[in-house]
Image: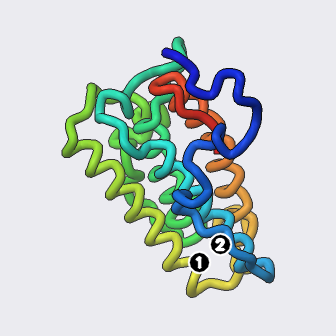
Amino acid sequence: MTDQWAGKGFGWQNMFVPPAEDPRDQGAVHGERDVLIDYLRIQRQTLQLKCAGLTPEQLAKRAVPPSELTLLGLVRHMAAVEHGWFQRVMQGNRGPRPFRPNGLHSEEFTFPTPTDSEVKTAFEDWQRQCDSADDYVTRTELDVRGDNDVELREVMVHMIEEYARHLGHADLLRECIDGRRGQ
């Protein structure tokens, strides 16, 4: 794989997409609630961006052996994490978590090479969890407490951190898959 940016130094050309094509709106926001909502939204959009344009095989590629991490596994993991924090911890919903039929964390990352339909289902389930979380956040004050006395604001900060950490993984996975990097 050749590096199309070799010798060009840092600049917009090194970014994942040119600024004019970046789908993430990063306008100014004010106030704690809006900042938390906006940062979480941008983190989610970044995961989607990192996965864009790849085949099911590429999304399921374990690009950094021996790690079991894959981009599709990260999408499935984040669906389970969204459900865990916003539905289980904050709302007391003890139903099954997405992509954990046996309740095991590793199940999110263990799957055969997916089909287009399975990829579509994973992204739809993840989006459904994000939408459910957004609905809850919209109608709930930040100081509302869930299980273990955790405040919604803490959950929001944790989710931003969780996405940010895994987006670092996504950066490496994507670069190993097709050489795209950054942003």
Q: CA distance from mark 2 to mark 1?
A: 8 Å
Considering depth in this image, is 139 or 2 the residue closer to the camera?
2
From this viewpoint, is residue 89 visible?
no
Residue bearing the label numbered 2? 37
Mark 2: few/some/many CA within 10 Å (<14, 14-19, 20+): some
The residue drawn where x is 61% and y is 40% is: 166
Decide: is 55 above or below 141. Answer: above
Q: Can you give x and y, in whole percent of width and height, for residue 178 in the image?
A: 46, 27
Residue bearing the label numbered 1? 137
**Quadrant of residue 14 within the rendered picture:** top right
Considering depth in this image, is 9 or 61 the residue closer to the camera?
9
The residue drawn where x is 69% and y is 74% is: 27
Query: Going by the picture, which residue comes out furthest to the front?
Result: 8
From this viewpoint, is residue 73 visible?
yes
The residue drawn where x is 68% and y is 42% is: 165
Which mark is in front, 2 or 1?
2
Q: Can you give x and y, in whole percent of width and height, for residue 132 in the image?
A: 45, 71
Q: Three-letter amino acid code at disc 2?
A: Ile
Considering depth in this image, is 48 or 127 the residue closer to the camera?
48
Decide: is 24 above or below 175. Answer: below
